[in-house]
Image (cartoon, grey):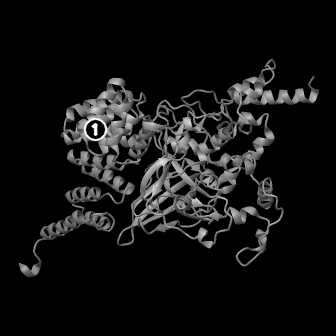
Amino acid sequence: MHSAATRLGSTACTLSVLALLAAGDAAAGDAAAGGAYVADQACASCHRDLWDSYQEVGMARSFFRPSPATAIEDFSGDGFFHRPSQRHYAMRLEGERYVFHRHQLDDAGRPIHRLEQGVDWVLGSGNHARTYLYRTPGGELYQLPIAWYAQEGRWGMAPGYDLPDHEGIGRRVRRECMFCHNAYPEPSPGGDGYADPHVYPQELPQGTGCQRCHGPGAAHLAAALDPGAPPGLLRATIVNPGRLSRQRQRDVCYGCHLQPAVALPGVRRFGRGDYSFRPGDDLADYQVHVDVVESHGAREERFEINHHPYRLEQSRCFVASGGALGCLTCHDPHRKVPPQERAAHFRAACLTCHASDACTRHPTAESAPATADDCVACHMPKRRPRDVVHVVMTDHRIRRTPGGPELLAMLPEYEPAIVDVRFYQPERAPAGKLGQLYLAATVVRAGGTTTDRLAALLAELHPRALDPYLDLARGLLHQQRFDDAVRVLSDLLERAPEHPRILEWLGTARAGQNRLEEAEALYRRALVHAPERPELHFNLGWQLLIRDRPAAAGRAFERAVALRPNMTNAWFHLGNARAAEGRLEPAVEAYLRALALDPRHARGYLALARVLTALERRQEAERYLRHGLDLVPRPQAIRRALAELAASSADAAGPEDGSR
């Protein structure tokens, strides 16, 4: 019989949960594979201590709305100059909003190509770094090119952007990114399959919540609220990772923390939705992890930011334990260990296997007394990952001898040269020809040229899922093998007659064959089913423009940039369409927007200069051409345009007085 205090506590929990549900709080969404989610805040009603403790853990703060209350950044400076791309960057706090600013300077020191973009979401707890995202009217998320590096207390280029020619504000955030950086979102009308658009609802969960590791909570909540629920139902309706087998425990963590090679991520099992994994599932039935062989450096030398299990499994401790050593040996996912307790906390984990109760290494100049009896400081030192070079992380490969200062030395951003791809865990990967199919699809999906191998395996195996056939079709389109692409896509269209992606790509293949009317018809057919896809409006506009229908083309391009305002080529061709109509001032506006988005867009400078010259604005034309001359990769055409502009300006001025 329960005590009165227990009954009162249970009633309070029930009322609190019901209030949350009645309020309609945004819940983590149900993915394609099924399972009912609730608002993560509902968990706090019964598990308050765990909830409060977890809010201090980085995962709970992995994704959130920006606000002055959560700001850790320094907004007081003027920003910074990125020399490789010749761009000035700043993030400013304007009222309640974070606003990203970027500009360049022309040869007279005047600002040019100004760009501003509000921030909609912050990605990253700030323990190491924060990056910044914005949402387009079409529902896509994009990353901004700068980051706040908390360890160094400064702004810098985000990972992958420290280059002369980077993606600017055009790096799309795909579902496979959000899979790990946040709780699952509410279901999208677009779905979460391989070919579905990467769009998100206006509101998203804020942080990696309870159900990301414990599974959907609706049945568990219903059992908690049901006084007649049979014994054991409460426990049976939720996943406790601590009670799973060792492998399934690891799978919960490895789903996000195992990435053998950031340069070549593995693929989902064909037919699996991005949000279909549930804690307790076999991760190998969801994700096929691959590893790479590089032209320089051994596998054991690679260290990347998402290498926690990858490096741990290279440790003698892990191997000798038979897999008993795992994430939960040292980490309580619900608690952030205070800094002053960390040495003792992790040392206690080591001493569950190691009998020695004192450090045997005498302090030296290289080993300060402060590291005495701090196992992690020597055997799991902090190190700079080669893919995120402005942070330092704990290297989870437990080593016998400490590393030196070279582990923390600054690194350049690194582009690996991959010479081979193999399964990370062959014993859990698909076997035989099916395994070869997954490897071929992985390479093609990353831009490789193994399309013929992929085609041969598909012809032999005939898998039911569309995913690998779409990989093949996209690879053929990238290689401009339009006849082959038409054959593949026509077969797919028989299986899925109204599939927008198949219709779109078949239209692109037909356009490549110069069968433009068929291409237009396919794009229009796809738009019936997917009117919010900016690529379709862009492709339709392009077909209309090259067939001398600039007014209709302009409307299509306008729709494309309304959905995706950062679409550089849509702005550029919108300028072309307006210029073809004789609408020169609106054409200038479109060209300027294209160049603000991509200051290295050579055709944009040339087209803008032509229109400005036609408007008798020669000085402006010269200004933009001179600016582009120093930026574009191949400036020969701009150099010729400058010479022609100078000659035409001299002709327009007439002969000098002395020659009359």
Residue 551 can be seen, yes or no: no
On the image, which quarter does residue 237 sit in? top right
Residue 550: x and y in percent read 22, 41
Q: Quadrant of the N terminus?
A: top right
Residue 459 can be seen, yes or no: yes
Say left or right for 52 vs 267.
Answer: right
Residue at 56% x, 59% y is 300
SS type, badge 1: helix
Residue 331: x and y in percent read 73, 50
Tell me how many marks there are. Answer: 1
Say left or right for 388 vs 341.
Answer: left
Q: Quadrant of the C terminus?
A: bottom left
Q: In this picture, is 538 found above or below 417? A: above
Which residue of the protein is positioned furthest toward the top in this rendering? 228
Q: In this picture, is 140 found above or below 529? A: below
Residue at 66% x, 47% y is 59
Say left or right for 246 vs 586.
Answer: right
Q: 363 or 107, which lies in front?
A: 363
Q: 17 or 71, which lies in front?
A: 17
User: Which kind of residue does numbered mark 1 sit on?
Assistant: Thr
Q: In this picture, is 259 found above or below 201? A: below
On the image, which quarter does residue 232 sit in? top right
Residue 434: x and y in percent read 44, 36
Pointer 1 local density, CA inside 10 Å: few below 14, some 14–19, many at least 20: many
Residue annotated with mark 1: 508
